[in-house]
Amino acid sequence: MKLGSLRLRLWGAATIAFAATLVLMGFLLIQLFERHVTRHYDQELQSYLRQLAAAVDFTSDGRVTLDSHLQDARFGEPLSGLYWQIEEDRTGFILTSQSLWDTRIPLPRDPLNDGQVDSHILPGPAGQTLRIQERQIVFDLPSGSRALRMAVAINVADIQAASRAFAGELWPSLAAVGALLLAATWFYIGIGLRPLDMIRQSIQQVRIGKARRLEGDFPSELAPLVQETNDLLTAQDESLARARARAADLAHGLKTPLSVLQSDADRLRGAGQSEIADEIGQLVGQMRRHVERELARVRLRERTPQVTALMPVAERLADFFRRSPRGKGLNWLIEVPEGLTAAVDAEDLTELLGNLLDNACKWAAATVTVRAQAIADTVRIAVLDDGPGVPDGALASLAGRGVRLDQETPGSGLGLAIAQDIADACGGRLTFSNRTEGGFAAMADFPLQPKSKAHA
């Protein structure tokens, strides 16, 4: 996957968004949990206050006592974190739970109304921080009214411990949720980007010649892109058509003047001016070869590579050359596996193989062989003859424009050059060599399938 991948960018943005959202959600949930736990403890403390008020009693001599103990066993355990305390401002009497041991809660001396409940955060025993619920209750006794401050407290560390335990379970859970969300996001991004892959495949079909336009059921968001691409393809086709027409018109337009020049050269030769006639004839021949090659190139640009079966093309051309004056006396061997294909247009393959066979037909002594085989992901098409071969120093220049090693043999010298142009235009490679057993070999390599560009 490339670093510039759109899928990675979208997934990275989703990762950042999910991470930020889940972290904020985690802190928010922890705060909400702390508030919930605090309210729960406050309600529990108020319940203890009511129980404490109900348990207060006075002895005959006026002392404050409890006629029952609170049910929670922590009130009897020293420094347990749960405490109660009763004070009387008038007498300074203080009664505490056993859990406070020999310490006192320093309650503030602020005035309280009867039944009013106040909350405080105050220091407690053993360095604890206490959350306190305080209430004043006035008792009407025969001896007069008695106002008592009652306080119940819990260690704040208990609330914090509950929050930490909740957070310890919350963060792994949120991490698991985040992982599931990211996995689902990767999947959904793939679904969302699938139309782009459809466009890529459609463009590939256009490139290899299986379609002329982008075709398919694309989302409405991509419809303008598809339309613009099709309009571009149409404009390109029209531009190429005009360019081909101009090139063809120019080439055909030059044929008549060249024919006139050739006629003039023939008349000059008949008038005894052979030197000038030969020079003009040579120039006319060069210009005609140039025109023919450019016409061949124009025909190449009209097509895009397709997959073509080799056997029918080879047999059809061999039958044609067998009936030619030179080919009648030759033995033609076709060694092409049935069903073997190559990524080349049928017309281009016909023209390339036709030029190679024409060259072999001119030079073969007795046999011309067409051989094809698949090598890895390519197909090699070889045209072999048993003629005199080519001087080793001339092999590299064979595909040159108008190169003719034997001026006496008929031909324009363009056959191998045109074959080279076809191989280059179709993504193939054309090579020449002399055979060890004698003769000449021309080998064209083409891909088995049209090449597709890699994608992410």
Image: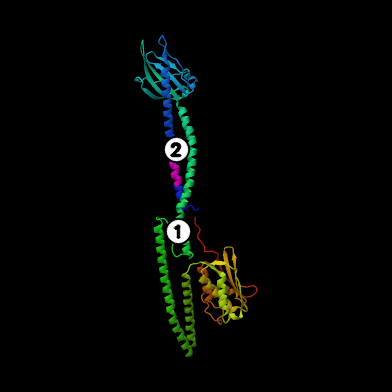
Q: Residue 259, percent across and down?
A: 45, 83
Residue at image point 48% right, 63% down: 205
Helix, strand or loop under label 2: helix
Above or below residue 168? Residue 179 is below
Of circles 2 and 1, the one toward us is 1
Q: Which residues are magenta?
A: 14-27
Does residue 24 show up magenta in the picture? yes
Compared across the picture, whether 84 is left or right of 406 comes to left
| Residue type, label 1 | Ile
Residue at image point 45% right, 50% down: 10
**Of 206 and 355, the residue lying toward us:** 206
Compared across the picture, whether 87 is left or right of 434 comes to left
Tag on residue 26? Answer: 2
Could you give the CA–CA distance between mark 2 and mark 1, rounded to whole angstroms? Answer: 42 Å
Q: Residue 102, percent across and down?
A: 47, 17
Compared across the picture, whether 329 is left or right of 306 comes to right
Does residue 297 show up magenta in the picture? no
Q: Residue 224, percent across and down?
A: 39, 58
Our reading of the magenta stretch's main secondary structure is: helix
| Image-quadrant location for residue 44 | top left
Q: Residues within 10 Å of mark 2 (few under 14, many from 20)?
A: some
Above or below residue 8? Residue 229 is below
Observer able to see residue 176: yes
Tag on residue 182? Answer: none
Disc 1: which residue: 199
Above or below residue 1? Residue 438 is below
Helix, strand or loop under label 1: helix
Q: Residue 125, percent across and down?
A: 46, 22
Name the residue at the bottom extreme. 271
Mark before the other along the chain sequence, 2 or 1 = 2
| Residue type, label 2 | Gly
How has the structure been colored for display? Answer: rainbow
